[in-house]
Image (cartoon, grey):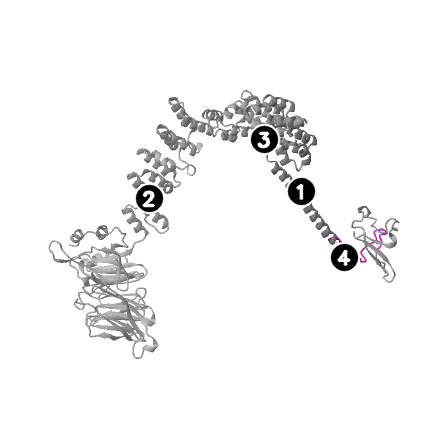
Amino acid sequence: MAEAEEQETGSLEESTEESEEEESEEEPKLKYERLSNGVTEILQKDAASCMTVHDKFLALGTHYGKVYLLDVQGNITQKFDVVQVFGLYSGEEFHETFDCPIKIIAVHPHFVRSSCKQFVTGGKKLLLFERSWMNRWKSSILHEGEGNIRSVKWRGHLIAWANNMGVKIFDITSKQRITNVPRDDISLRPDMYPCSLCWKDNVTLIIGWGASVKICSVKERHASEMRDLPSRYVEIVSQFETEFYISGLAPLCDQLVVLSYVKEISEKTEREYCARPRLDIIQPLPETCEEISSDALTVRGFQENECRDYHLEYSEGESLFYIVSPRDVVVAKERDQDDHIDWLLEKKKYEEALMAAEISQRNIKRHKILDIGLAYINHLVERGEYDIAARKCQKILGKNAALWEYEVYKFKEIGQLKAISPYLPRGDPVLKPLIYEMILHEFLESDYEGFATLIREWPGDLYNNSVIVQAVRDHLKKDSQNKTLLKTLAELYTYDKNYGNALEIYLTLRHKDVFQLIHKHNLFSSIKDKIVLLMDFDSEKAVDMLLDNEDKISIKKVVEELEDRPELQHVYLHKLFKRDHHKGQRYHEKQISLYAEYDRPNLLPFLRDSTHCPLEKALEICQQRNFVEETVYLLSRMGNSRSALKMIMEELHDVDKAIEFAKEQDDGELWEDLILYSIDKPPFITGLLNNIGTHVDPILLIHRIKEGMEIPNLRDSLVKILQDYNLQILLREGCKKILVADSLSLLKKMHRTQMKGVLVDEENICESCLSPILPSDAAKPFSVVVFHCRHMFHKECLPMPSMNSAAQFCNICSAKNRGPGSAILEMKK
């Protein structure tokens, strides 16, 4: 019969999962399992009616009046036929036979203490049993007359019980009943829909009756309100209705676990039937509640059960909940991280499962991070997300070389080697060379750019370089001008230290890395005959490299190599001259022609800065090419300033330049020549009038101007001359004022300094006789002369002043001609 029902109802886990899938995709909060072993044996012969939980033991009561003590696995440890108080960890016992049926019993929470040997029983009366001082048990009636007592819960000093009329709370300390909470729905039979009680803490009682839940808080009464009232009172802090009838309650942190009896109406027959009981987790609010999770449980024989047939017990501190029905006992536990990961894997949320396992790796017992990761990779591959799968390999496979190689072959089988190539390990660990070569060959057959990228990124020691070089050369036979393959081959040659072949390819391709290659591997001996190629490729970089390495490739060698390319020769020599004016002095004569031919703007600066170029040769070239500015400079440098000035005036017709030249030379004869040349040219006269004032007296020019000659802007020029003259006068007067003021200030300062006293004591000596300046006998008369230079003399040690000058001077500082050595003080006594 039990087997038939098992087949009919299905397993608890399957039914729960199926319900969750149908109702919500949210993860369940609890997991369930049936208590088997001894429980199965008991319930095949009898039916469960109640259960209580303590520590690691369960006490199961049956319809036939038996009580079984079970361990948490459901194994029977002891059996009782009468009401008995039995010490789990001691030999203490109490048993009694009652004259009426006992519906419920509750033991003092601290019964183990000698002062707390108390328990209560409920039937038609609520009896309190206490052990007296002679180890005898005495009973007292706490309540009777309101029908059977079907539920009792003891917490701390408070006992709560429910009878047909409502819920009462008794204070065991004051021996007073402190409240009565009447039941709401009196239409429900109390024997069919019994009250469920549970204590959340020492002062919070939760009552479930019918479809109503009340949360009551026991509070202390203020002394001014006590009078004849109990010292405590009860306040209902929350009250709400549920969708179904309540069969049991249990606290879960700040939430509630509610076992509900469910009735539904069949769509086919339209008749009401008993559905699977529900275990809900709810969040109480002041006037309502919020459902957190809901599970429908398939227990054996749920179709025949009534509301009174279900009970909910819990183990404090362990979040274990026991759902008791006549033919089944189910344990509900909070789901741990392993269960959470199971659910995520079932929903194919592999990434979340992997993250959860990593966060809780110390707490998980049934799962391994690597197994979850491998399942995740397989899942991504099955979905065709190859790139994501390959990227996850880095994190999941870590440094496990064997797993890496296995995954690479797996990607090869599905033709996705390219997807995993960017993520292969390149250092720790290092895979077999065959793995890397296999991927390189894959790219070489279909993607030259990707092949080149891998060669650049992968260290050359990961694979057999000669094998890859040969494969590239075979491909170049089909496409010899492919720049990507040529460049990659050059890089492979570089890895193989075959720098000569690499350099040749780089120069052929005119590749920017050629200079880096030369520097990095010191290939200067290989480029002595390739200087022209390097200059053609990038003259700036080539010249900088050659000049930075003169010790490896001499200036002479470079100039010789560039002899047939004078424009490149000029670039090299010009850069050399800019760095050092003297290093290439032997080529300065050659450079005159090179500048004249290829870079005239820099010819004049070169002539000015060079001290080694032959001036006659330079003058000849400049005159041949009619380079006026350069010729003027050379003539002036050779001392022929008049010819230079004449050339400026006759060839350039630039009066400003002529005036500037005359100012530079600062030669009166040049100014005379300039005036003579300009005297019949009005524009030149204007220029001279505007600029000559600070170097030559303008009157000399004005007197020579012919009468009647029209000179442009003459008035403005004359005004400017007068303004310049006035400015000079003002400057002179200003300077004079400053000098006078400074002189007066310094004179006053000197006078103040000379008026100050000078300390003369026993430590000072006469600079002439070197004896102490002051006599040892202070009573004797003495005479001392002190000079501003701080030299001191006995008056008799100084020479007599000359007849020409009555002033005395320090013998030591006499060369200073009345400087600080003039006398300032004469001391007599």
Of labels 2 and 3, the one closer to you: 3
Range of the magenta residues? 749-772
Q: Which of marks 2 and 4 is nearer the N terminus?
A: 2
Residue 272 position by quadrant: bottom left
Determine crowd level at label 4: few under 14, some 14-19, many 20+ residues with C-alpha closer than 10 A.
few
Q: How far apart are marks 2 and 1 (CA)?
A: 98 Å
Are the residues at dot 2 and dot 4 in contact (C-beta closer than 8 Å)?
A: no
State the residue position of label 3: 578
Are the residues at dot 4 and dot 1 in contact (C-beta closer than 8 Å)?
A: no
Task: Pick whichever, 782 or 702, lies toward us.
Answer: 702
Three-letter amino acid code at the position of disc 3:
Lys
Establish if 303 lies above or below 344. Answer: below
Three-letter amino acid code at the position of disc 2:
Asp
Does 755 lie within the magenta span?
Answer: yes
Are the residues at dot 3 and dot 1 in contact (C-beta closer than 8 Å)?
A: no
SS under mark 1: helix
SS under mark 3: helix
State the residue position of label 4: 756
Of labels 4 and 1, the one closer to you: 1
SS under mark 4: loop
Three-letter amino acid code at the position of disc 4:
Lys
Residue at x-position 65% and y-position 32%: 707
Give the left or right position of residue 373, taking residue 102 as reference.
right
Q: Position of residue 754 (x, y in %)?
A: 77, 54
Q: Where is residue 810 in the image (x, y as percent from the top left)?
A: 82, 50
SS under mark 2: helix
State the residue position of label 1: 728
